[in-house]
Image: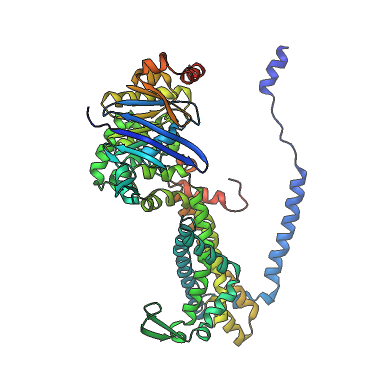
Amino acid sequence: MTQAAESVESMPTVRRRQPGRWVAAAVVCVLLAMLVNTFVTNERFQWDVVFDWFTSDRILAGLGRTIQLTVISMLIGIVLGLVLAVMRLSDNPLLSGVAWAYIWLFRGTPVFVQLLFWGFISALYPRLSLGVPFGPEFTSFSANELISPFVAAILGLGLNEAAYMAEIARAGILSVDRGQAEAAQALGMTRGLALRRIVLPQAMRVIVPPTGNQAIGMLKTTSLVAVLAYPELLYSAQLIYSANYQTIPLLITASLWYLLITSVLSVGQFFVERHFARGSVISAGATDRRGSLRRLAARLPGRRP
Amino acid sequence: MAQPMVKAVQVHKSFGRVKVLNGVDLEVAPREVLCIVGPSGSGKSTFLRCINHLEKIDAGQLFVDGELVGYARRGGKMHELGERAVAEQRKNIGMVFQRFNLFPHMTALENVMEAPVRVRGESRATAREHAVKLLDQVGLSARRDMYPAQLSGGQQQRVAIARALAMRPKLMLFDEPTSALDPELVGEVLDVMRSLAEDGMTMVVVTHEMGFAREVGDAVVFMDGGVVVESGHPRDVLVNPRHARTAAFLSKVL
């Protein structure tokens, strides 16, 4: 009896062997080695050409235009999306109906087609004018001059993005408990103030992660703008390889830049998320700033938190 | 007699086809603590929410400090007030909710400061000074920089009381303030409410705490089926009820 009681405390535990894991790891290692091997030994990748062009002026100029398109389109998308989300949640059936129809239209047609429409807008409206609705006009412009490929790209991408952002923002607003708005109103806040100070900051926790997704999506979607002959990153690469026939290396150059910017955006998203996690249980215990890089590392794919 | 702080005249309210309030009449004098008791579904919480117009009433009239709530009488009709006018009226009416409804993205101190700064336009320094004093009053000066998620239910509710008091209201509404609390935390919230009553705050309290109603309440109203069944001094209503429905309810809860 006593012997058994003693050994219960000192008995070591033996971890279960998991041979399956070792086999899987070995298979993955072999596949990775094959992949690296082909990258290094297949000379048709022409890594020297890839890196020659990587920081060339034309590629960097294209990259700058891609970033500019992404930022402006996302800003339009976020601001207009928020307005549409508030409209959809309005008690006014006309406002919510209009917002619903906007989302239906812009989400229901390919963004590629929308870009083409904006590019060819002058075929539909040769002249655009400013004036009193159904009344006299003050001034008018040629649509061709006003809607440059850049403006067409911004309109196409931004207005399309707004439809998606509207649904993301609406989900965020709906995720905040009704009692929050009630408590704010009971304190004498108007609905606008309650939305701005109380509801939206909490909704941001739900809004930010999918918005990060959208921003990364937008970065890549800007490559469709090539159809408007606007030399963003991909079209710049295409222009170069159509002259020197180094198609694959230049596509890799562009892809590497997309990957790099996506990585930067992901890091940015982490910090925005942490900002809006204020007061949540997860952030409550770990408010020191030093731990943030470690937590970021823990969230990278392949690591367990 | 002085003008009542709250006066309800034949207040009616329906949610769709369900009649919740069927003509509620009552009065609360200044500095009085009125406890509303009754079975769930009796309309007591709905009535409380009508007092600061969180619910619109369908018929009848509700006055707070002599002022019609949520409506203006013009030409023999009741015109609903605009959002800003209602917000203006709510500044004077504090409310404490069953589920606290603290703002989770703000610390305790920021919760208390928010409305004075944003709604009354007080300077941050003034609001902060007042907020510190109020948190001290509810016994939470040590926790003013904590977020709601780091506080117990009882502490959260005390912050919520301080937050409502920060607007210097002339009337406080309590909607079952201890119903969401663990039993051992009920006392600390009731203590704060008791001292508030002693300081002369006019309070309307929807509650299931019969002990509190009997000790602190100046008057008790028993509601059932959307009407006031019985009202009077706590001793009379809670100890010697005149109506069978009151007696039946009390026999279940006491």
Q: Is residue A291 above or below residue A167?
A: above
- Residue A9 in picture, x, y percent from top left: 66, 21
Question: Residue at coordinates 46% horizontally, 63% vertically from top-left?
Answer: A78
Q: Is B38 on the left-hand or right-hand side of A302? A: left
Rendered location of residue A95, percent (x, y): 47, 61
User: Residue A60, position in %: x, y?
Assistant: 49, 76
As rendered, which of B29 and A166 lies closer to the eye?
B29
Image quadrant containing the N terminus of chain A: top right
- Residue name at image x 54 percent, y 51 percent: A297
Residue B57 visible from this viewpoint: no
Q: Residue at x 29, y 49 (%)?
A: B74
Most extreme residue toward the top is: A1
Where residue A14 sits, quadrant-wise, is top right
Q: Is residue A84 left or right of residue A12?
A: left
Give the camera-side residue of A281 and A292. Answer: A281
Which residue is located at x 51 percent, y 60 percent? A166
Residue B24 lies, with reference to residue A41, above or below; the image says above
Coordinates of residue A139 in the picture (x, y in percent): 36, 84
Q: Is residue A254 above or below residue B137?
A: below
Residue B172 visible in the snapshot: yes
Q: How many marks?
A: 0
**Quarter occupied by the C terminus of chain A:** top right
